[in-house]
Amino acid sequence: MNGIINVNKPEGITSFDVVRTIKRLCEKKEKVGHAGTLDPLATGVLPVCIGKATKIIDYVMNETKIYKAVLKLGVNTDTYDKEGSVVLTRSTEEITKEGLIKSLKAFIGEVSQVPPMYSALKVNGTRLYELARKGIEVERQPRKVHIYSIDILSFNLPYAEILVHCSKGTYIRSLCYDIGEALNCGAAMWELERRKNGIFDINSSIKLEELNSDNITENLVSLEEALIKYPKIYLDDYFQKLFINGVAIQDKRLINTIPDSNQVYAVYSKDDALIGLGKKNNNSFKIEKLLI
């Protein structure tokens, strides 16, 4: 069983709970892993990789994301969301939709984010949320993320619903906090739904509770479909053997057919079987990930 299931994660469970459920459905015979953590509060798209598909988890995680989030304005919590303790409240009387639209413009493009203390990021081998639960706060290094767009779906004080298209690694809770500070009223994330992760869309997802041992196979997305964004390269038997053995191929008969350096390619056999992922660096072509 090899492929990816586009799970619609319910609220109240962890991403690892989803993995455990699917592993049970596979009768623990397959390797299973998720491609991008969703907090228990969050719902929506959670790609779960099974079998050989676990080899491309990093590639699935690297895709852009779309989130629908509800902010509660006028409140700050220690976790930046509704599950935390309220640490500050401020008036929202002067907040308008026009003011929110104006403030959001500053967050479009490449921005620096400080990861929240209540996150799974590790510092010196310890997850931040484990330190936070002990009342320990440590310095976190800002990280660059890219926000492509933020649209307001609804505005009804103290709540605002937004749709965010962003890069991998974006903390929506931190974004909500930063928006609140820009408005000088504070904000916390009240709801979060991941609508899209690369090719995986909420509209084609399956609810976790609807998955069972009888329908799990029919809900698998193939590796070929998951990697459809990568240009294809076909290798004959000679080059295929070199590629599989990890040889940096410098033969111009192949190199001259590959247009772009530093581009990842989906590599297929002459019989249209997916072999792996490869990349051209200068004058050589080499395996990135073997998928057979």
Image: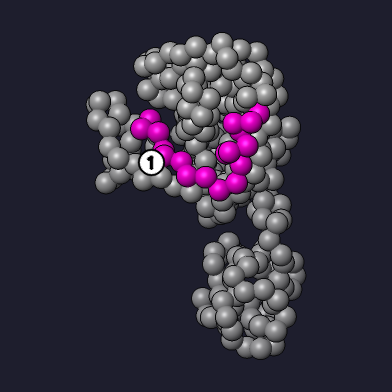
Q: Is residue 198 above or below residue 158?
A: below
Residue density around tag 1, few if under 14, some if 14–19, many if 20 or more, within 10 Å: some
Indicate the position of residue 8 as horizontal and vertical percent values: 62, 30
Residue 111 magenta-drawn?
yes
Residue 202 visible in this rendered orientation of the protein:
yes
Residue 103 is left or right of residue 90, and the answer is right
Q: Is residue 235 above or below residue 189?
A: below
Tell me what residue is drawn at x 59 percent, y 70 percent: 262
Element under label 1?
Answer: loop
Tag 1: amino acid: Leu
* Residues in magenta, as a range: 101-118
User: Which residue is identified by label 1?
Assistant: 121
Indicate the position of residue 74 as horizontal and vertical percent values: 50, 15
Dividing the picture into quadrants, the one containing residue 202 is top right
Q: Is residue 104 above or below residue 85?
A: below
Tell me what residue is drawn at x 54 percent, y 67 percent: 288
Q: Is residue 108 above or below residue 43?
A: below
The one of 1 and 172 positioned closer to us in this rendering: 172
Count the labels in the image: 1
Residue 119 is left or right of residue 4, and the answer is left
Tell me what residue is drawn at x 41 percent, y 45 percent: 142
Quadrant containing the C terminus is bottom right
Image coloring type: one colour
Residue 41 visible in this rendered orientation of the protein:
no
Dividing the picture into quadrants, the one containing residue 215 is top right
Indicate the position of residue 160 as horizontal and vertical percent values: 62, 20
Residue 183 magenta-drawn?
no
Indicate the position of residue 109 as horizontal and vertical percent values: 60, 46
